[in-house]
Image (cartoon, helix red, strand yellow):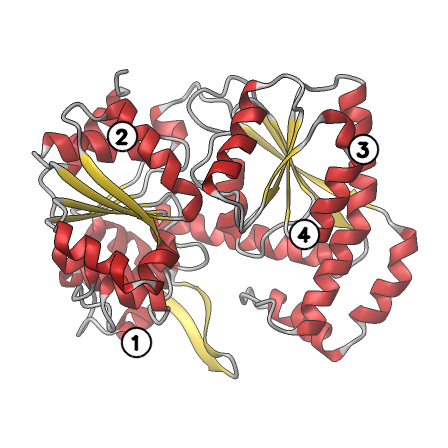
Amino acid sequence: MDLFPFQRIGAEWLVPRRTALLADKMGLGKTPQAIVGAEMAGARTMAIICPAIGRLNWAKEIRDWSIYDLQHRAHSYDMVHKHEHVRDEIRRMKPDVLVLDEGHYLKERDSGRTKTIYGPFCRGDGLVQHAGAVWVLSGTLTPNYVHELYPHLRALAPDILPGAGSFADFLNEYTYWERSTHGIKVLSNKTANLPHLRMMLKQHWLRRTPEQVLPDLPQVIYGELPVDSEDALHELRQMERTVEVQELLHRLDDLEAVPDSDPHIASYRKACGLAKAKPLAGMVFDELSTEQYDKIVIFAYHRDVIGILMHELRAFDPRVIMGGMSDKAVREAYTSFQEKPRVRVLVGQINACSTTITLTRAHQVLFAEQSWVPSDNEQAIYRLRRIGQKSQISARMAYLDRSIDEAINRSVARKVRGLLQLFGENA
């Protein structure tokens, strides 16, 4: 196999860099760029830290792309954080290259895995200090706002940070923020200062989009899909009147990230998903039965919602990918979907199925439930929009009509537009 010309440029860009952020958009093949770049740099050992779902894919990609039998070990972020013996293995290995795949997993400077890998204060004195080079791969390094770049820059490129390099300095320079009862609340990016940040990042950051390097790659057509469920609306109206869910609506208006930790919000969100599941399954059943398309990927969040979708669409031999499945089971699910004509549906739990895997046999994607983190939804769509996709992709975002579910859709869309400002892409 040969790299595309833009991938060859990416591999060569990595070669001289002790630290690098390869931020190509999803589907452009960052994995082979890292493998070929490592071998071009003379590396013989590579350690990879990635989401659990990606471990098998890295083994396959190294078999496909390594010329010099690159010695490698791949571990999940959770394994590295939780198990000292895994960290010891990486320390003893002293890898020529340490790859942090899906690097947005390290966006929170106070999380345990970020402290393990970058050090307690993100000063680069964590696990990364034992590697010859550290390359971060992610098409969505800032899932919400620009401040999520800070842990990477503090550990790997502290010279470009403003002021004394503190988190407060970074917030003040590039975001509007305030303190709230939930801690620091970022309101938006400071758009006027983002060109300066992009200029400072140039030596450490490489980002290309499909439109720039693969203009023939099929586009994504986004559509909203309102779902009417009169049976559920009365119950949801009662839930929407609670103080907690009303607060959720205000926080969405402020573009604030909302966690699922509050039981009222979690219950409301689940009720919305359950209300949409059967009507959506019926719609998909009719579309597949009348051969409107060959295959479809459906993303959801709750296991009960996934269960309904799987049951209602059982005539189409569906496969499922959910959190907690073994690497082998995940691989069987998506390879069956890719290779077996009778398997016409794949239902993915969005947080377990939005990275690494390839689902190019479908060009229809339906979100029965969305993530409240915009980049999770984009990552999920890019499981289909990858090299090898030959058809225009239709992505439909379902929401429960006349409910807060509709407001969530609007909030997520606004966040996406805000993120595009950093990357200089059209909103």
Residue drawn 92% across the image and 54% down it: 231
Q: Which residue is mark 2?
A: 62
Disc 2/disc 1 C-alpha distance (Å): 40 Å
Disc 2/disc 3 C-alpha distance (Å): 41 Å
Q: Is disc 3 placed on a helix, strand or loop? A: helix
User: Horizontal placement of 333 versus 33: left or right?
Assistant: right
Above or below, 299 relative to 272: above
Disc 1/disc 3 C-alpha distance (Å): 49 Å
**Where does the image place residue 169, in percent across and percent down from the top left?**
26, 73
How packed mark 1 is, by other alpha carbons closer than 10 Å (few <14, some 14-19, many 20 or more), is few
How packed mark 4 is, by other alpha carbons closer than 10 Å (few <14, some 14-19, many 20 or more), is some
Q: Which residue is mark 3?
A: 283
> Looking at the image, is mark 2 or mark 3 earlier in the sequence?
2
Disc 4/disc 2 C-alpha distance (Å): 33 Å
User: Horizontal placement of 316 versus 79: left or right?
Assistant: right
Please say whether residue 6 is visible from this viewpoint.
no
**Where does the image place residue 373, in percent across and percent down from the top left?**
53, 55
17 or 263: nearer the viewer: 263
Q: Which residue is mark 1?
A: 168
**Where does the image place residue 14, in percent across and percent down from the top left?**
16, 38
> Looking at the image, is mark 4 or mark 2 earlier in the sequence?
2
> Looking at the image, is mark 1 or mark 3 earlier in the sequence?
1
> Looking at the image, is mark 2 or mark 1 earlier in the sequence?
2
At label 3, the amino acid type is: Met
Q: Which residue is mark 4?
A: 303
* Numbered disc in front, either 1 or 3: 3
Residue drawn 62% across the image and 50% down it: 370
**Where does the image place residue 12, in percent across and percent down from the top left?**
15, 31
Query: Image quarter for residue 258?
Result: bottom right
How packed mark 3 is, by other alpha carbons closer than 10 Å (few <14, some 14-19, many 20 or more), is few
At label 1, the amino acid type is: Ala
